[in-house]
Image (spheres, coloured by chain):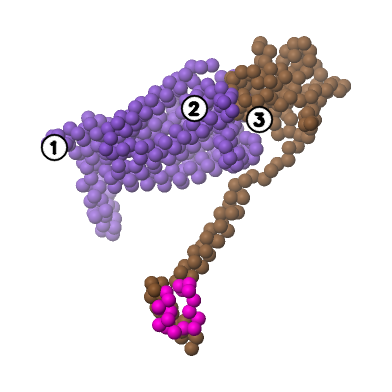
Chain colours: A brown, B purple
């Protein structure tokens, strides 16, 4: 009896869609619901497709994002040996995954800073004839303390501490606060 | 000859393509004094086909990866017979293709071929131009030399400056926080798989639109023809226009051959991730106008970083450019003049900034 009733409803699916209440009443089915059957099936199917799509899209979106790599540099690194740099010259050294710049000033003082230009991340260099730090990409200049002097750089280069221990020159990241 | 004819007949008996090619044989294109500007799109397509062919050839020797890429290109250029020529053709054809794509765009702009009903053709074309520049940007890194390394660093950093979405985009492009071998692997994937698939599809759509709507007639010619209908000239697409186009391709091939053989493309110095950017570093000429404009901006404008302002400005211009056909009001003559004026200004800006960027230190 019940099966027959649902069969009838399926057969008049279209009718139910068009005029829900009156259509239901005519069949005399006790389980008549206010949700039209076709709409329900479409919702189920559409929802299923959406869920399937999400099940594909989500892993792919996550896949796009590369895993974080640890910065293996730590807070301190040997940038050079004593005597390696002539006065009024600079050297790029590796500080973790980024380059740093060590300068021996004309006055014999060591200065160290990040070599990543604060403008668009090019690697800067020391220009002995200018006595300044210069970025070749967009002509930005910085002072020996890392302060941005001219050109597009918006911020100073991060300055590092320099310590000479024995014949090694250690560069250390400054602790905030 | 008879063998060929017999083979054709044999195929024709089985496939019967008469009804398929009938519209093509009937197809006509307008003929007027500005017709030659309409060859630029076809030449761009021809250069794209050369890119696909030479790109496949380069794939036979190229190895992506920061330890192998530079060496494999070096090997290709010094050991492989005609390797230097294939790479030189690929590089020159890429540059010519970007040039003809730009020229095609500006000719469409000045001949007003973007007007209704061709808005979608314009939009697909602007997207194609962006994708072609993406081809240039991603391909430039593949030899893994110093110039390419810093160009990619700066280019992806610029993408990273976009507020909110910039940083995730930058990390997605670089395959990490920094430009490394992971970036090279990604760019290789974009360059040889993602972009070719999208561009091929979009070229198909672009050509389908052109096919459906026929070729646009410039307003000046249109006015003359309206006044004097007997002056209307049309020419058959097959064989008249197609053969002319083919001749244009042949000339293009000649120019490409001369450039590639006489001025072989350099390989440069292998990228060193821990070296300073070399003095005099500049991007490829087609990015030069943006590079120079960004270089001229001060570090701070009011409270915003100059860079961010520049990027937002270029982004906005790009969006307006894409929607240009919708800015032109059908009825008012003023909007038409306004768009032509804007196009002339844009062209002058691009040329001036490119020349300035080229000569500036």
Task: Reply yes or no: does residue B176 show up in magenta.
Answer: no
Up/down of B260 relative to B217, above or below: above
Q: Whole-Å distance between the Cαs marked 3 and 1?
A: 67 Å
The answer to whether one can see residue B325 in this image is yes
Read off the residue under disc 2. Answer: B290
Q: In the depicted view, which residue is nearer to us: B275 or A30? A: A30
Q: Label 3: few (<14), some or many (≥20) within 10 Å? A: some
Q: Secondary structure at mark 1?
A: helix
Vertical comparison of B356 with A25: above or below: above
What chain does mark 2 sit on? B
Pinpoint the chain carrying mark 3.
B
Q: Residue at x 83, y 23 (%)?
A: A163
Rendered location of residue B45, percent (x, y): 37, 38
Range of residues picked out in magenta: A20-37
- Which one is in front in this view, the residue at disc 3 or the one at disc 1? 1
Badge 1 sits on which subunit? B
Q: Secondary structure at mark 2?
A: helix
The residue lying at 48 percent from left, 88 percent from top is A1
Mark 2–mark 1 Cα distance, whole angstroms, equals 46 Å
- Residue B247 visible in the current orientation: no
Query: Are tags 2 and 1 found on a single chain?
Result: yes
Circle nearer the N terminus (2, 1): 1
Of residues B58 and B121, the one nearer the viewer is B121
**Residue B229: mark in rendering:** 1
Q: Earlier in the sequence, mark 3 or mark 2?
A: 3
**Mark 3 = which residue?**
B273
Displayed quadrant of residue B224 = top left
Mark sitting earlier along the chain (3/1)? 1
């Amino acid at each position: 009896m019940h099966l027959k009733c649902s069969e009838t409803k399926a057969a008049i699916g279209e009718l139910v869609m068009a005029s829900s209440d009156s259509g239901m009443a005519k069949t005399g089915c006790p389980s008549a619901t206010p949700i039209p059957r076709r709409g329900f099936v479409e919702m189920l199917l559409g929802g299923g497709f959406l869920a399937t799509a999400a099940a594909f899209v989500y892993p792919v979106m996550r896949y796009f994002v590369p895993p974080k790599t640890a910065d293996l540099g730590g807070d301190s690194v040997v940038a050079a040996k004593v005597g390696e740099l002539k006065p009024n010259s600079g050297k790029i050294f590796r500080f973790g995954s980024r380059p740093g710049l060590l300068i021996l000033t004309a006055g014999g003082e060591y200065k160290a800073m990040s070599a990543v230009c604060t403008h668009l991340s090019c690697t800067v260099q020391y220009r002995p004839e200018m006595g300044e730090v210069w970025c070749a990409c967009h002509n930005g200049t910085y002072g020996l303390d890392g302060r941005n002097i001219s050109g597009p750089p918006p911020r100073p280069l991060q300055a590092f501490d320099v310590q000479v221990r024995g014949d090694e020159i250690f560069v250390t990241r400054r602790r905030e606060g | 000859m008879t063998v060929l004819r017999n083979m054709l007949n044999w195929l024709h008996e089985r496939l019967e393509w008469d009804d398929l090619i009938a519209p093509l044989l009937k197809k006509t294109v307008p003929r007027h004094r500005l017709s030659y500007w309409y060859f630029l799109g076809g030449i761009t397509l021809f250069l794209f086909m050369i890119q696909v062919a030479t790109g496949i050839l380069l794939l036979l020797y190229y190895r992506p990866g920061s330890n192998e890429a530079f060496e494999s290109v070096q090997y290709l250029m010094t050991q492989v017979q005609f390797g230097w020529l294939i790479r030189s053709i690929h590089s020159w054809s890429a540059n010519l293709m970007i040039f003809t794509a730009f020229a095609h765009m500006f000719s469409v702009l000045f001949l007003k071929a973007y007007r209704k009903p061709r808005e979608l053709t314009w939009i697909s074309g602007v997207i194609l131009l962006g994708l072609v520049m993406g081809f240039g940007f991603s391909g430039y890194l593949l030899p893994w030399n110093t110039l390419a390394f810093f160009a990619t660093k700066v280019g992806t950093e610029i993408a990273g400056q976009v507020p909110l979405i910039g940083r995730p985009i930058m990390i997605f492009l670089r395959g990490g926080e920094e430009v490394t071998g992971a970036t090279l692997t990604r760019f290789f994937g974009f360059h040889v798989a993602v972009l070719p698939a999208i561009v091929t599809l979009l070229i198909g759509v672009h050509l389908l639109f052109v096919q459906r709507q026929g070729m646009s007639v410039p307003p000046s010619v249109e006015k003359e023809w309206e006044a004097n209908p007997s002056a209307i000239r049309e020419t058959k697409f097959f064989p008249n226009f197609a053969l002319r186009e083919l001749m244009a391709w042949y000339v293009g091939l000649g120019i490409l051959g001369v450039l590639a053989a006489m001025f072989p493309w350099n390989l440069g110095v292998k990228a060193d991730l821990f070296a300073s950017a070399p003095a005099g570093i500049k991007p490829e000429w087609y990015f030069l106008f943006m590079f120079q404009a960004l270089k001229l901006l001060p570090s701070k404008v009011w409270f915003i970083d100059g860079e961010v302002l520049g990027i937002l400005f270029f982004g906005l211009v790009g969006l307006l450019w894409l929607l240009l056909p919708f800015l032109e009001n059908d009825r008012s003559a003023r909007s038409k003049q306004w768009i032509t004026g804007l196009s002339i200004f844009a062209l002058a800006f691009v040329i001036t900034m490119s020349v300035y960027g080229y000569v500036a230190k």
